Amino acid sequence: MDTTLLVALVEHHNNVDHAQNGWKPHVYNACIKHVKDTCDVDITKENITGRIKTFDKQYEIITKMLAQSGFGLDWVKNMVSVDSDEVWSRYVEANKDTHAYRKKVVLNWESINTIYSKDHATGVGARTGAACVQEPQETPVVEESPEVPQKRERTGMLSCA
């Protein structure tokens, strides 16, 4: 169900339905319908809000880990990887709420990261991935540079008197 919910949320995120203070109201209805149609599971806005809080917490914890030396993401196992037990012990000692993430499988990290990452373009000319796919690609016109005469080679020695 999480995968299905995240598919719908990513789609609406790409359509700029995700504001700073939360999702636009129609997104919840679309997610409820998408999960019902795909998984035959009835969910409510409260269920979605709860899962969104969980995804947000996972994003915050994992991105803080990945920003530290010695941490990475194992894309095959869908887990945070750590260089050594010592690195892990020091990190958990300073961040008590992360102890469960040593062996925690986090599915759909790419979708969670897409929704919650802060490095999205905004302003004039900003486009989502969906918008880029829909627009036809224009081939840039490369203009030939004008002929520039070659520099003459200096011969002889210059003397400074």
Image (spheres, rainbow, N blue to C red):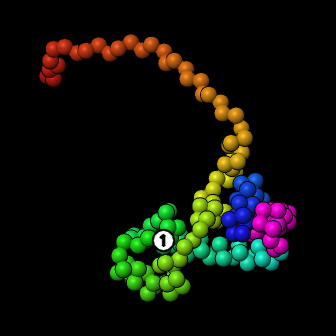
Q: Is residue 136 above or below residue 146?
A: below
Q: Is residue 132 above or below residue 110?
A: above
Quick check: 56 left or right of 94? right
Q: Is residue 47 above or below residue 128?
A: below
The residue that disc 1 covers is 80
Looking at this view, name the residue that lies furthest to the front.
40
Disc 1 residue type (three-letter): Val
Give residue 29's position: percent from left, percent from top.
Answer: 85, 66
Quadrant in which the C terminus is drawn:
top left
Magenta region, residue range = 18-43
Give residue 116's position: percent from left, percent from top.
Answer: 64, 65
Residue found 47% across the figure and 78% down from its top? 102
Q: Quadrant of residue 2?
A: bottom right
- The answer, for residue 49, to whether it is visible in the render is yes
| Nearest the eye: 104 or 149 | 104
Under tag 1, what secondary structure?
A: strand
Give residue 40's position: percent from left, percent from top.
Answer: 81, 68
Quick check: 34 left or right of 51? right
- The answer, for residue 60, to whether it is visible in the render is no
Quadrant in which the N terminus is drawn:
bottom right
Residue found 14% across the figure and 18% down from its top? 157
Asked if residue 79 is among those painted magenta in the image, a careful observer would answer no
Label 1, residues with CA under 10 Å away: few <14, some 14-19, many ≥20: some
| Nearest the eye: 108 or 160 | 108
Residue found 59% across the figure and 74% down from its top? 58
Number of numbered tags placed on the structure image = 1
Asked if residue 42 is among those painted magenta in the image, a careful observer would answer yes
Residue found 71% across the figure and 54% down from its top? 14
